[in-house]
Structure formats: C-alpha cells, structure tokens
Image (cartoon, coloured by chain):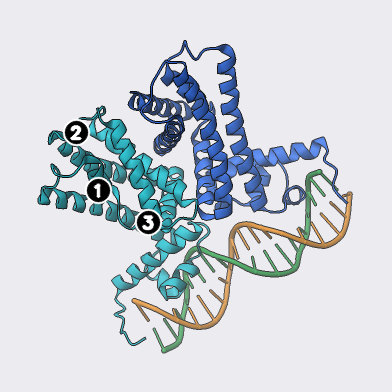
Chain colours: A blue, B cyan, C green, D orange
Amino acid sequence: MTTPVTRSRENTRARLLHAAAQVFAETGLDGATVEAVCERAGFTRGAFYSNFASKDELFLTLASSVGEARLAAVRERITAMLDENVIRETDPGTLVRQIMDSGDDDRLDVMLMSEIRLRALRDVEFGASFLHQERELVRSIAGIIQQIVDSGQIALRVDAQEAARLLMVVWEGMIVREAMGGDDGERLRRVGSEALGRMVELMKV
Amino acid sequence: MTTPVTRSRENTRARLLHAAAQVFAETGLDGATVEAVCERAGFTRGAFYSNFASKDELFLTLASSVGEARLAAVRERITAMLDENVIRETDPGTLVRQIMDSGDDDRLDVMLMSEIRLRALRDVEFGASFLHQERELVRSIAGIIQQIVDSGQIALRVDAQEAARLLMVVWEGMIVREAMGGDDGERLRRVGSEALGRMVELMKV
DNA sequence: GTCTATAAGTGGATAGAC
DNA sequence: GTCTATCCACTTATAGAC
C-alpha cells in the first residue's frame, strides 16, 4: 500500500531536510549521523526511516532541493528586474551582484555547497546532475547579462555564457576562502560582491 | 617480491602517507578507514599507530605535505624560468600556464584538494594555516607576474597579487568542474590551461 | 506517523607477542 | 618496528508497540 501524503508527513520531511542542511554542513555527509539529524529536527530515528529510505537518499533529496532553490531564486530576481525595467538605470556591476547574491549565503551555506560539490566529484552520476543544474544557473545568468549587453550599457570582451561561468567560479572561490576566516554572512557577501564588481570591470571592453 | 624493502621508520611513514593520499581522495576523511589506508600501504593497523597518533594526525600531516609540495613545485619552476631567461621570449599566457600546471593534477589530486579545502572550511584553526599556505603560493605567483609586467611584455588592469588570486581561483574552479565529468588528467590540465589563457587576456590592458 | 528497543555490523585505538 | 588479537564505542537500519 502506498503511504498517503498528508500535510504532517510533508511537514516532517521538511523539518528533517532543514535539520539535515545544518548537520551535513557542520559535520559532512559521512560525519553526520542520522541520529544527529533527527535530534535537531525533534524526531527519532524511527520517524526518519518512515520518511527516507536511507541517509544517502536524504542527502540526494537535500542537494536537489538546494540546487532548485538557488536556481529559482536567481530566476525570480531576474524576472523582478525585467518587470521593474531597472536594467537601463542601474550600473552593470550592481545588477550582476544583485542577481548572484542569494541573500542567505552564510558560513553554513558555503560548507553545505562544498560538501555537495565534493560528492559531485566522487560520484560521477550525481556529478552529472550537479553539473546539469549548475549549467541551468549559468544559462539564466548569461541571459540577463546578454540583456544588459543588448541594452547598450556595456560591451564585454567575452560572450555572456563565459562571463556567467567566470562570475560564478570567482564568486564561489572568494566566499569559500573568506568563510575559512570564520566570518559571518554579511562579510562573505561583501567580499563576494566586491569580487564580482572587479570581474565585471575586467570583462568590460 | 625479490626487492628487499628497507623498513625504516621514514619509509613506513612515507608509504602510509602515499596510501592515505589515495584513500582520502577516494572516500574522504570520514569515509576512509585506517584499515583501508594500511591495507593499501601493506601494513596493519598496529604498524600505523606506531607511526601516527590518530587518523586525524595522518590527515593533517598529509595536508601540510601536499601544500608544501605544491609551493615547492611552483617556486622551482619560477626559479628555472628566471635562470633560463625565458621571460622576455615567451608569451605571458604560456608563462602563467607553465607556472601553475603542476604536472600531476589528475582526478584524485582534485578530490584530495577538495577534501582538504572542506576541512579548512570546517576547522577554523586548520583553515588559518591552509590560507597561510595558499597566500604564500599566491605571493610566489604574483612575484613572477610582476617580473613579466616589469619586463614590459604586458600591462595589467589589476595588480599582480590580485591577478594571481584570480588565476588560482579560476584554475581551481574549472578543473574541479571538468573533473566531475570523469575526465583524465590530460584533459583537466588542458581545460585549466585554456581558462588561464582567457583570464590573462581579460586582465591585459 | 512516531516511538522504543535492539540487532548487526563497523571502526578507532590499545596491549602484548615476536 | 610490526604483527595479532581484542575491546569498546558508535552507527545504520529494522521490528514491533502505541
């Protein structure tokens, strides 16, 4: 018999996923115990195994959900910008920063992303879906960059796709290194944001 | 096996470190068992614990040794270039590529570096020494970039330090993503190298 | 759906023989 | 210095009560 999806079941899954994001970020996939995730979510292991087949399934679900949330957030901000018609009025560096700054990049988010990245490196199958998801993100960002270019505000020395890829890689590299200093979210975003600004300057004609 | 192996303490430690590099890269720090490391090195756990206090000490020793090797390799190549007086004759992009291409960046190396990076993110103390080591690397690379600039071959839109940082971050980000496709070392280095070339072009005046 | 209890297995670390 | 044998803590996953 298939278990009916009730509101409380979804709520339990959501709470477990939320707790898992923190625990996986802090201690890693292998270091995290199912017990620790359950404890933080306020459940016991029995409840967990009635919602997820294994720790690994939980991780894959979480990774996919995090990736989709990032993509959705970027697309939402892009849509908002297009609706508000701010592209011609705002300078390109600021625009790019506003697109990429997810608003909740703190130390734990950086750690979780690094954990997911590492898993993508080890597991070829998961790596393929990770890359696919990231390419979607790059494509969305490249789209808005192209719009900025088309608006005549800026001319680039590389195509929009390459620009988006570089911005993403530099952003990630910078906030990871900054997070190693134990800094908080605000400082991370400032450092990442500054790096993006400098990259935009470099890519300009 | 007819080859007599001198079982000196240093030899044992070196073999354990070599095995650990592979095992940690493949399965991660937590995922790796001391047993697996010993098996690959051809020892038992007893021998291991007579050489290292714990799995963690092994990891820290390995990480430090890997970092020092990278730094030494870069400095060696820089010294060789200065001795051979090739700076004025070779184009800047190629020079940068030759400095950073460590010659043994295959999938496993990328995985090990990612594992070390993740630990640096979680453990603030280790993170500080990781950043210190990386800053040394950046300083060395910045030094040679400054030499190239001083030779009049090229003019940059950013200072040498910032250029070196960007090159390092972009190189890492590109080869990591390429490694997710399951590619071999040759392809990784080609992709990283191309990215460096494009970055140099961008940074040029 | 969630709980308690527990089975079954794993892995880090130590003691003492050779 | 290295080996064998072993201890003990911990973890995943399951079974069955509520």
Which structural element holds mark 1?
Answer: helix
Crowd around label 2: few <14 · some 14–19 · many ≥20 (10 Å): some
| Residue A51 drawn at (x, y percent) | 75, 47
Across the whole image, how many numbered discs are drawn on residues?
A: 3
Residue A119 coordinates in the image, percent (x, y): 54, 51
Q: Tell me what residue is drawn at x 85 percent, y 49 percent.
A: A2
| Amino acid found under the numbered disc labelled 2 | Ile
Whichever of callouts 3 and 2 sits on the residue coming sooner in the sequence is 2
Same chain for mark 3 and mark 2? The answer is yes
* Residue annotated with mark 3: B186
Mark seen at residue B99: 1
* Residues at marks 3 and 1 on the same chain: yes
Q: Which residue is mark 2?
A: B154
Callouts 3 and 2 close, C-beta under 8 Å: no
CA separation, marks 1 and 2?
17 Å
Secondary structure, mark 3, is: helix
Q: Secondary structure at mark 2?
A: loop
Return the residue nearer the eye: C4 or B167: B167
- Name which of mark 1 and mark 2 comes first in the sequence: 1
